[in-house]
Amino acid sequence: MQCIVCKMGNVQPQKATAVFEINETTIIFKNVPALVCENCGEKYFDEETSEKLIEKAHKIAQSDVELDIRDYNKTAA
Ligand SMILES: [Zn+2]
């Protein structure tokens, strides 16, 4: 697959970092399976992963912390 953003690079399966900011909470997920552009670094998450990330991020945001960093694979849904 070719990158949609730069239209130059090819995307490769990699582990990426996803960052969410919800209200006052910043949530960082590490080791998220993604396709990453070799050229510009744009990340593409599939639909299932995106949904899980959003769901998890919103749950974490309810806990009222300012910053939460976790491993995607060790985070319960
Ligand atoms: Zn790109």
Image (tube, rainbow, N blue to C red):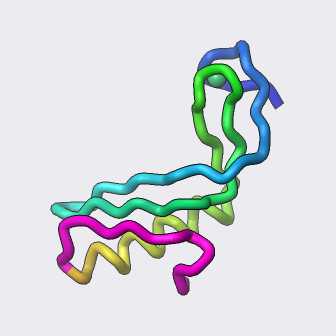
Image quadrant containing the C terminus: bottom right
In the image, is 10 to the left or to the right of 46? Answer: right
The answer to whether 53 is drawn above or below residue 17 in the figure is below
User: In this rendering, is residue 40 above or below 67?
Assistant: above
The quadrant of the image that shows the N terminus is top right
Vertical position of residue 39 compared to residue 61: above or below: above
Q: Position of residue 20 (x, y in %)?
A: 37, 56
State the residue lying farthest toward the bottom.
76
Q: Position of residue 11 (x, y in %)?
A: 76, 33
The stretch in magenta equals 64-77
Quadrant of the rendered image containing residue 9: top right
Q: Residue at horizontal 53%, vertical 80%?
A: 75
Q: Which image quadrant shows ligand 1?
A: top right
* Residue 48 image point, x, y percent: 68, 65
- In-front residue for pair 27/4: 27
Name the residue located 68 percent from the left edge and 30 percent from the top edge.
Answer: 37
Q: Is residue 18 above or below residue 54?
A: above
> Closer to the camera, 58 or 34?
34
Q: Is residue 37 left or right of residue 12?
A: left
| Residue 74 found in image quarter | bottom right
Examine the structure image and report whether residue 73 is included in the region drawn in magenta.
Answer: yes
Name the residue: 20% across, 74% down: 65
